[in-house]
Image (cartoon, helix red, strand yellow):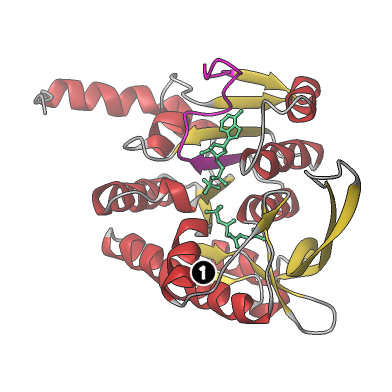
């Protein structure tokens, strides 16, 4: 790595000032996708960036995924898992593992890294203090064989219906960093698995966050020739979903961006979380790296 002179270091800090002022006392929701978690060094750098946000009077709220980590555990246990419309079909055995992995190992690892970097992270899931209530998800898909639309039962999968901010506001008020696993409770007390992008959008919308950053493993939304689309309007995003350019896990991500904008979140961005210091680059420099979705 090339050495940066002390003067350059001072300049870099000084140039970050207007950005820091723009986000002063604002809430920023960062969705940290399972694919973005990468190696230990990248994960620890991510944690440092989150602590730096807190240190500069920003209120970061982390919502994490863990799709690949769930897949690894299910495979170890010999449980087969399938997806429909980008969502994991979750039966009774699967929801147990999903909760164990998301609210257990993944959540505590992120909390550990943030705390190691000097922050005070509190790991929770949407079940705590009834933070996120959800209703069972229903989806229709086109059957690949018959090309006929059919309803799929996704099992214990939910769409957020209500976010209670009581606990989150308390934590933010005490300068604690909430780290949230995307699980929710149904009206009748069942645990539901929620797509982490959807969960992050619901939380960002309820908090009226200044920014929602979705960290994934691709540079942003790519066009048909795999080139990055730096800015995308809601209208064009819908077109790209309809013509299949946006597919799989990118669908809930883009739908989340649209929802968050409609809920009053000022800016939503999809960025490559595997890039070192992706969060700082996005917030504190003039270099926007991913795809900004706008109205
Ligand atoms: N148009 C597109 N641009 C970028 N990625 C896309 C697009 N369409 C589908 N994808 C897929 O979406 C994936 C990101 O979603 P997902 O795997 O759910 O990530 P995460 O775990 O970060 O939530 C990419 O790795 C890519 O395979
Ligand atoms: C219903 C549903 O699909 N839930 C997701 C929750 C985790 C997630 O969304 O993780 P990523 O952000 O890493 O994709 C799952 O079971 O994989």
Q: Quadrant of the N terminus?
A: top left
Where residue 225 sits, quadrant-wise, is top right
Residue at mark 1: 102
> Does any atom of ligand 2 lie closer than 8 Å to the CB of label 1?
yes
Q: How many marks?
A: 1
Quadrant in which ligand 2 is drawn: bottom right
Q: Is residue 10 above or below residue 258?
A: above
Q: Residue at x 47, y 28 (%)?
A: 219
Residue at the spot x=47%, y=57% of the render?
Answer: 68
Magenta stretch: includes residue 227: yes
Whether residue 237 sits left or right of residue 278 in the image: it is: right
Q: Which residues are magenta?
A: 211-230
Q: Is residue 116 above or below residue 212?
A: below
Side of 227 where 126 appears, left or right = right
Q: Nearer the viewer, residue 152 or 108?
A: 152
Name the image quarter holding the C terminus: top right
Image-based side of 3 in relation to 201, left or right: left
């Amino acid at each position: 790595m090339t050495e940066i002179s002390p003067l350059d270091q001072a300049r870099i800090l000084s140039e970050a000032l207007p950005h820091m002022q723009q986000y002063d006392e604002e809430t920023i929701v960062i969705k940290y996708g399972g694919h973005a978690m990468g190696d230990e060094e990248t994960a620890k750098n991510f944690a440092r960036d989150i602590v730096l946000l807190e240190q500069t009077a920003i209120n970061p709220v982390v919502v994490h995924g863990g799709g690949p980590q769930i897949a690894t555990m299910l495979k170890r246990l010999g449980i087969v898992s399938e997806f429909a419309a980008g969502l994991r079909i979750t039966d009774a055995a699967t929801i147990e593992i999903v909760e164990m992995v998301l609210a257990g190992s993944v959540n505590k690892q992120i909390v550990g890294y943030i705390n190691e970097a000097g922050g005070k992270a509190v790991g929770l899931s949407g079940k705590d203090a009834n933070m996120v209530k959800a209703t069972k998800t229903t989806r229709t898909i086109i059957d690949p064989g018959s090309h006929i639309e059919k309803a799929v039962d996704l099992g214990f999968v939910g769409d957020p219906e209500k976010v209670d901010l009581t606990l989150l506001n308390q934590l933010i008020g005490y300068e604690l960093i909430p780290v949230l696993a995307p699980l929710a409770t149904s009206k009748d007390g069942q645990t539901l698995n929620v797509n982490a992008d959807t969960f992050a959008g619901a939380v960002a919308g309820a908090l009226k966050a200044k920014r929602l950053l979705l960290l994934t493993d691709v540079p942003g939304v790519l066009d048909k020739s795999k080139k990055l689309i730096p800015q995308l309007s809601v209208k064009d995003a819908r077109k790209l979903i309809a013509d299949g350019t946006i597919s799989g896990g990118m669908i809930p991500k883009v739908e989340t961006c649209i929802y968050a904008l409609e809920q009053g979140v000022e800016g939503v961005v999809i960025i490559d979380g595997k890039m070192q210091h992706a969060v700082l680059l996005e917030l504190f420099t003039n270099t926007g790296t991913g795809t900004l979705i706008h109205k």
